[in-house]
Image (cartoon, coloured by chain):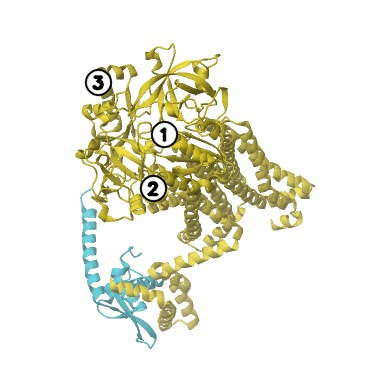
Chain colours: A yellow, B cyan
Amino acid sequence: MFRRFTHFFAFLFRRRQLEDDLDEELRSSFEMIVDRFVAQGLPPAEARRRARLEFGGFEQVKQNIRDGLVGFSLETSLRDVSYAWRCLQRRPSFALIALVTLTLGIGVNSAIFSVFYAVLLHPLTYRDPEQLAMIFGSFRAAGNARAPVSAAMLSEIARRNRSLAGVAGMWVGTETFPGDAPEQVRVAQVTPNFFDVLGVHAAQGRTFVKEEEAGGRPAIILTDEFFRRRFAANPALIGKALDNRLAAMLVGVLPADFQLHIAPDTHVPADVPAFIPFPYDIYSTPRDLYFLRVIARLKPGVSMVQAQRDLDRVSAEIRGAYTIYDAENLRFSLASMQADAVRDLRPALTALFAGASFLLLICCVNVTSLLLARATDRRREIALRLAIGASRGRIVRQLLAEGAVLCFIGGSCGMAMGWAGFRVLLAIRPERLAHISDAGIDWPMFAFAAAVSLGAALLFGLAPALETFRLNLTESLRACGRGWIGALNRRAGAALVIGEITIAFVLVTGAALAARTLAKIEQVNAGFEPRHRLTFQINFGRPIGPDIPLRSIRDWEAELAALPGVERVGATSHLPLDDFPNWYSPYRPEGVAEHDAKTLIADHRSVTPGYFAALGIRLLEGRYFDAHDRADSRSVIIVDDLLAGTTWPGESAIGKRVEVEHVAGYGFAPVSSTVVGVVEHVRNHSLTRQVRGEIYIPFEQSPRSPLSYVLRTNVEPLSLVPAIRRLLHRRDPSLALAKVRPMTDYIAREIAPVGFTAVLAAIFSALALALAAAGIYGVLNYQVSRRLPEIGVRMALGAGAGDIFRLVLRHGLALCAAGALLGALSAILAARWLSALVYGISPRDPLSFALALLLLPAVALLGCWRPAARAAAADPAQTMRAE
Amino acid sequence: MEILQGTLDLLILRALELAPMHGIGIADRIHQVTHGTLVVKPGSLFPALRRLEQKGWIEGQWALSENNRRARYYTLNRAGRSQLAEEKRNWRRMTSAMNWMLESEG
């Protein structure tokens, strides 16, 4: 083996000497044959002639030798590559367009695919994540099919199911960590088996045990990030009581990559830094208190469908066992945790992925048309080389070498662009995609995407190259490639251009729809004024009313109002567009039977009198709450116009009586109240949807903690924060400000995903237009150069430059018109599918279609202009002579 | 007669088994020993020699020929000898297989 290696290298490095040896050996052998003929008595001249006949050509023998040897064939490959490189250099515009096209196609695709993969396909970082599922309740009081469930339901599911290995419940609240810098954070309250069901082990310490349930032995688990930031990752703290209000023992720290993956509409945020077992016995809460989010782990080998069937049986049993759940018509629905966590992102990301794929398709078309043109150009060269004795294998090798050089450079540039593109996407990604950064770029997947893109481009590119080979040698030499382009190439070129325009049309309408949707959402009247509003949340820790006097809350609000720069102050239990668990309850207007009222659900908000004016919620009728609406005065409510309009159509809501739920301990109690005002509907959950009616209750009649404050300011909102912190510290050093944000942040966070989609769609369509223009230019330019003789004839027969110019332009624009027609049809067909992504406009929005109809001819004109001008400038005498 | 594909290596190795030879000598020897049945043309002889040399079975050295020309003489080395033995075995198996096939009854 070693010997073969040394020979191999000897051949590589001593090539010069070997060539000399070979020459000399062949020459001397030739002389020997001559000698032999001379010895047979032939005259020297005749002997040499006979020897030459017998020997054959020196060069041919040498070439045979070169082809047969490893070292030489490697060298031939290197020579092929350098020849390919020179060929590409000779036509820099071809090489440049091909490289830019490949780079764009591969770059955009690998970047988008990386995001697509990281968000939708990357397996969750739990043990056997495919077995994890969410269980939602569906019952009349919930008003939707994705409701939280009661503790009684959770225990019944756990007891009666046959398909689940474990089922756990959670609820997310807030807790304040006191100290020099008190901090209020979200704390998830969970059943002790929560981490076992998820399949997550503590990185340090342990997870919860049964004895820690219901405040039996207060315990807490922190995320790695929070443990580092707040406790400097001090390992001595594990097993010790943390200095928080619960005096819970720190039993464990989660792994650094731990992350919750639960859909945002469940109000379980992704960045919960601490977990505790429920500090009270959840199973003693009322059966109609629906608050638990449920995760389940399927038994091995059980499919989602089987588990759903099992849950259907469980819910039927529960309906039979509890009249209250029978009246609610209780059902459960099961959804894979992975799919459910990103269900809101799926349509937009899929659309972006489709957009990137369309872009790749345009790139492929461009590469095809370029290589087709190139192959036709080189037909004569190839035929000539075949004729003077080059082997077919040699020519295939050379064509492949050229493809390989293009692919290598285009692929490297594409990968680089894809990587840069992924970084850019990370930089502009909406908060909803924040967790991608943890996963980062998945290199094998990234390489896979790049390879697929490259493969697609090559496949398209190879076809014309192979086509070259089916030619008949003599025929193509004779025809100089003229007849061939006549039929195949012109038709193929036309099809490619039409295809490009079609795809570009679809992408441009898509981008226009996205941009128009963004504009519509930015104009949405959310029911409040977000500008010049500072918001923050305070968790008072102890129950307000019994433990904290209402007066002190009033005083605190007065202190805030007295700050310079503050115009109005108010507080609410739940800010609009916040991810804090929503409060929605049934209500019963007077005169409606209790049973029928079960389906009447409204968002409930406990607000201080100043809240409406502070947030700029418009009063439509009646009055706002005022200082007279106290705990001991008559119960009053304010409703929104949505609820008033559906409950008392055509009547004034003022003075109507409604039974609403007030907070009472860990549950709620119905209280009969009088409507004193109607305000404009506030979009609490989404800028694009009116979810349900709203009922406001005076804070002092139904106190809740935490409270979110809204300050209307006449200075930059965040500039007030230090003063507010000082004020709060003087008042109670154990309290902390949380979620300190201008109200505009909540709006921006809602808009961000739409903006992200719109920006990417705009980039895609701009690229598509540029590539389509390049594609049209390439095809037409090529056709013009092949038709120059014909054009010459036309000119000789009296056609003017203007006629020729129009001829080419007309050809290009006709293709564009056909493409636009197909594009419009495809866009109309795709509209149904896009309806989930547009807001405020029809997916067949005429304006968006008009934009595409306007832009594409302009692009086509741009692509046609140069070739048309070139044709018009042709000199008939010269073109005909060239023939 | 054409030389069967793949048998040229065996012929060359066999020719070199007795003594080192130069290219033309090898061709002549094959011609003589096969009573003129097989003719090796330079166009295939020299590539084969280079191939065998690269595989490390024969070694080439410059020396003076019988009529005082500088010629490249090839020697069969140890690896070449074992290769020759191997190829002989293969060839015998091949020929007997061919014979069985050709002489089998209809």
Which residue occupies the foreground of this view, A623 or A779? A623
- Rendering quarter of residue B99: bottom left
Choose the circle earlier in sequence order: 1 or 2.
2
> Marks 3 and 1, how far apart in space?
28 Å
Q: Position of residue A878 (x, y in %)?
A: 74, 57
Quadrant holding the N terminus of chain A: bottom left
Q: Label for residue A182?
A: 2
User: Is disc 3 in the same subunit as disc 1?
Assistant: yes
Q: Residues within 10 Å of mark 2 (few under 14, many from 20)?
A: some
Which secondary structure lies at badge 2?
loop
Choose the circle earlier in sequence order: 3 or 1.
1
Q: Would residue A128 appear left or right of A764 to someone viewing this image?
A: left
> Marks 3 and 2, how far apart in space?
48 Å
Q: Position of residue A44 (x, y in %)?
A: 48, 83
Q: Would residue A235 appear left or right of A55 to someone viewing this image?
A: left
Q: Relative to B100, does residue A248 appear above or below in the rendering?
A: above
Which secondary structure lies at badge 3?
helix
Which residue occupies the foreground of this view, A742 or A374? A742
Q: Label for residue A317?
A: 3
Q: Residue furthest bottom?
A: B68
The chain containing the residue under callout 1 comes to A
Q: Relative to B1, does residue A476 appear above or below in the rendering?
A: above
The chain containing the residue under callout 2 comes to A
Residue type of the residue flagged with mark 2: Pro
